[in-house]
Each structure stands twice: as structure tokens, then as C-alpha cells.
Amino acid sequence: DGGITQSPKYLFRKEGQNVTLSCEQNLNHDAMYWYRQDPGQGLRLIYYSQIVNDFQKGDIAEGYSVSREKKESFPLTVTSAQKNPTAFYLCASRPGGSYNEQFFGPGTRLTVL
Amino acid sequence: KQEVTQIPAALSVPEGENLVLNCSFTDSAIYNLQWFRQDPGKGLTSLLLIQSSQREQTSGRLNASLDKSSGRSTLYIAASQPGDSATYLCAASLSGSARQLTFGSGTQLTVLP
């Protein structure tokens, strides 16, 4: 059963703590993306990666970090430097090359207590 | 910088009506435009993708059009059903190889039985 999985579904964090969100895909897609969604708003791009061991900042990368050590995995770390981390986080992937459509995971809702 | 706007923010219609959702973008040099559906607390489901060279795409009761010169796209839903109730998001893709998406804030559709 191919797809994109994100874990956990809900995550609670105390202020000052780092937390890592998982994103795994078994679609053999080259490109992966992390987005943040705030209530009543569209998605904003945090980081993206087009190939293993390479990634670029999106529009709102401050306070976040990523790694891409394996093609199927693109974890996102929300650091204590992120001032307002409470949001819904969505991971997406795309086959790469000229193929344009992005496919999304189910999301992780992060709440800072 | 590309900006994407969706109007109205919310729409309520009786079952069976045909309806149009609007999406506008500021930079006509897009690579493609994608329409998504999002159910509450869920990830995004891709509905239609229109390449910049295309004028429209159809899938079942859905038809999406693209007019690059005017910076507009529309999503037409025929014979609406209560199951169509969701938030609909449009996203414009930049021309770079990363195919980054810029999202609108969405239209929340409610179809009343």
C-alpha cells in the first residue's frame, strides 16, 4: 500500500523543547516538501528537498531544520527558536523531473503547551 | 513574489446546485495550477492539475479552467452533494525545477442537504 505517512498525528511540546516530526514515503518519489498550515490559512513552505543529502529553505524556514539521509524519509525538527510553532504540519512528495503533481500526507498537529 | 487569492472564503449552497470557486494569482508565469480538497483535520487530496499550456481539466463532476493572461483559475462543481463539503485550496507552481507551490487560503464549501 503506497503512500505518505506522518507521525505522530498529534504532538504536544513544552516551550523550549525541540521536537521532530516524521515523514516517510514508499512511492519512490525524488522530491519532498514540508508545509505549515495555520487556522483559516493556506499552506506555507518550510523546506524542500529534490534529492538525497540536499535541501533548500522555503519561505518560513527560521526555527526549523531538516535532513534527507534516505530517499524515503524527510524528518522536520521544530526547534526552540521557532517562536510560534503551534500549527498543522503537512509533508508532501513529488516524483521529480517534469512530473508536477504533489501528493500529501495526513499531517501532524503540533501544540505547544 | 507570487500571491494567490481565493474568494469567497466561505460558501454555502443547497444540494444539487452547480457552483464555481475562484482563484487568482499575481504572476502569470506559472508552470501549473493545482486544486486540492481538504477535509477537517486531514491532509490534502489532489483534485486536478492544469499545466500552463492547458485551458482546462475535467474529472467527473469537476472542471478546472486556467486563464494565465488574466491570472485566474476556476473550479466548477456540477450537481453539488453534501459529500462535497470541504475546504478547497488552489496552488500555483513556480517555473523552477523544485515546482514550489504557493497556496491560496482556501474556500470552505458547505453543501446543505
Image (cartoon, coloured by chain):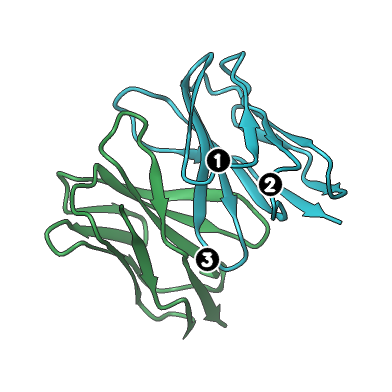
Horizontal and vertical percent position of residue B85: 55, 70
Asked if one can make out residue A3 in the rendered structure from this viewpoint, the answer is yes
**Disc number at residue B4?**
none
Q: CA distance from mark 1 to mark 2?
A: 9 Å
Q: CA distance from mark 3 to mark 2?
A: 27 Å
Identified at 36% across, 56% down, the residue is B60
- What is the letter of the green chain? B
**Outermost residue toward the left?**
B69
| Residue on which disc 1 sits | A61
Asked if one can make out residue B14 in the rendered structure from this viewpoint, the answer is no
Identify the hue of chain A: cyan
Q: Helix, strand, or loop for circle 1?
A: loop
Q: Are marks 3 and 1 in contact (CB under 8 Å)?
A: no
Q: Which of the chains bears the disc numbered 2? A: A
Total numbered labels placed on residues in the image: 3
Return the residue nearer the eye: B27 or B68.
B27
Q: Are marks 3 and 2 in contact (CB under 8 Å)?
A: no
**Disc number at residue B87?**
3
**Disc 1 marks which amino acid?**
Ala
**Disc 2 marks which amino acid?**
Gln
User: The C terminus of chain A appears in which quarter of the rendering?
Assistant: bottom right
Q: Is residue B19 left or right of residue A2?
A: left
